[in-house]
Image: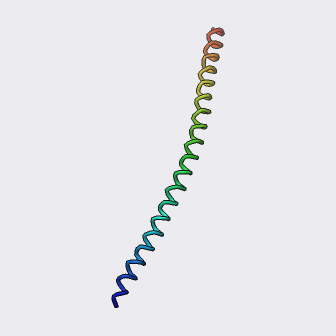
Amino acid sequence: MHWIPIAAWIAAAAIAVVVLGFCAYEIAWKSKRLRSDVAELMTLTAGLTDLQGSIAVARQRIAAASAELR
């Protein structure tokens, strides 16, 4: 009967190893996904910055054109 606690501890250790392995996998997967998302957001930010510059140039051209018409 003394084997029951030993078996319970072995089962608990095995479950702990499986749970910790799954947690490590999830953290690695989510970290990779977040790095990918950050790269996409940085690309989007660069595009939006370029667009903001183009809008500023267009506004200046519109202001200059409307000033010439007056």
Quadrant where the N terminus is found in the figure? bottom left
Q: Is residue 23 left or right of residue 5?
A: right
According to the image, what is the colour scheme of the structure? rainbow
Q: Note whether 43 is above or below 6 in the view shown.
A: above
Q: In which image quadrant can residue 15 be found?
A: bottom left
Residue at point 45%, 69% (across, down): 17
Judging depth in this view, the residue of 39 and 54 nearest the camera is 39
Residue at point 61%, 28% (across, down): 50
Quadrant where the C terminus is found in the figure? top right
Judging depth in this view, the residue of 3 and 62 nearest the camera is 3
Residue at point 52%, 55% (across, down): 28
The spot of residue 13 in percent (x, y) is 41, 73
Judging depth in this view, the residue of 18 and 5 nearest the camera is 5
Judging depth in this view, the residue of 21 and 45 nearest the camera is 21
The spot of residue 39 in percent (x, y) is 58, 41
Q: Is residue 13 left or right of residue 69?
A: left
Q: Note whether 5 is above or below 23 in the view shown.
A: below
The spot of residue 52 in percent (x, y) is 59, 27
Badge count = 0
Residue at point 62%, 20% (across, down): 57
Q: Note whether 10 is above or below 22 in the view shown.
A: below
Q: Note whether 34 is above or below 64 in the view shown.
A: below
The spot of residue 3 in percent (x, y) is 37, 87
